[in-house]
Amino acid sequence: MRVKLFIATVDVLYAKLISDNISEFHADKIDVCTCCALEGLQEALSKKKYDVALIDPTLIDYTDTSSISLPLLLWSQTDTIDTLPEGWERISKYQRISSIVSSILEKFAGVSGSRFDPGLKEAKITAVWSPAGGAGKTSVALAYALSCVHEEKEVFYLNLEDFSSVPCYFTENNSSISNVFEMLENQNGNVKMLIQGVCSCENGITFLCSPDNYEDINILSDSNVHELITACTGLSDELVIDLSSTCDARIKKIFDLADSILLVTAQTTLASAKLAQFITQNNVFENIKEKITLVANKGVRISDPAVDSLISLPYIQSNDAIEVCKKLSESIINADIQTK
């Protein structure tokens, strides 16, 4: 679904700048039409319905909003309009166009009323999990994501840990994932569109910033998780989900949705003991066994894995988390996957 955007402004250069930028960089999200003259404004609005309109303050009194779902005032600090007509919102005119696009998607997601169909699925879903903390699960998840970028795939990294690792690996300069959690809980908008508006991208990996509060992730029901994951699959070729080291109902639901599971272990007594317990004492293992690739991280040697697929990764000695991920990614790209 592309948002139908109408831009009405007497600033011809601004209209060209923003429409050209959206057409070049955001055409997959937004279909844009512009009008720079009062004479053609009503004719343009009478021919087509629009999802969102950016309206210059000088044209606000001449704009019939009956064909516009969400009218937005192109506002700058020099404008003197104090009260907006009912249903209107402001949007800052002088900001990065990418930020304007994000705001458009975020605002329209909240009023569009359409829900993303959870029955659709496009991306391959890879869940990354470990029964033990400290095994290097997040480093492996992001290394795998980088290896997918190397294959020229569109990659979405979704961190669903109890305590998010996102700030350690990415620059957080966009809206929190809590905005998405709130929409999922309240069932009041288009989740996929909101995610498009608030996600960020670094090193070819699209991601959502960490929650505002630790408790925010706990509001999600199983159906919320399903919708969140399915919405993300509609935005990528590969969805990499980084999970907490628990095995509750939510984790089991994600295991069910996943196409493949990277089960991470490391060379510690704790990691070995917890992996052995998961394999021998938890009936979940047998249900997902065919999806699992065991990732022997940090140089651990496993002579007789309980699954058919094994990747061995080296121990990277570095305090730089990004450097570790990049080196592990190279190892994954060049890995000789052992199969029984």
Image (cartoon, rainbow, N blue to C red):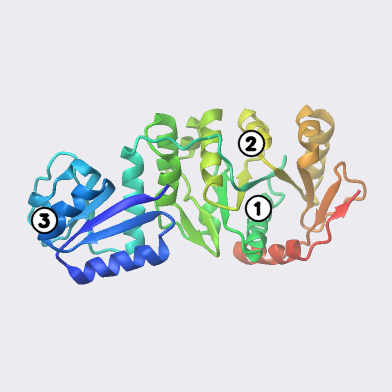
Q: Label 1, label 3: how many angstroms apart (C-alpha)?
A: 50 Å
Q: Is residue 336 left or right of residue 318?
A: right
- What amino acid type is highlighted by mark number 1? Ala
Q: Nearer the viewer, residue 143 or 204?
A: 204
Quick one: 99 or 105, which is closer to the camera?
Answer: 105
The percent position of residue 180, horizontal first and vertical second, equals 43, 41
Asked which secondary structure carries label 1, the reply is helix
Mark closer to the chain start, 1 or 3: 3
Q: Position of residue 111 (x, y in %)?
A: 31, 38
Mark before the other along the chain sequence, 2 or 1 = 1
Residue of label 1:
141
Q: Which residue is mark 3?
A: 59
Q: Which badge, 2 or 3, is on the more N-terminal residue?
A: 3
Q: What is the distance, in whole Å, between disc 2 and disc 3 at their CAs?
A: 50 Å
* Residue 77, quarter of the rendered image: bottom left
- In the rendered image, residue 278, in percent from the top left (x then y), is placed at 78, 34
Per the image, the residue denoted by label 2 is: 254
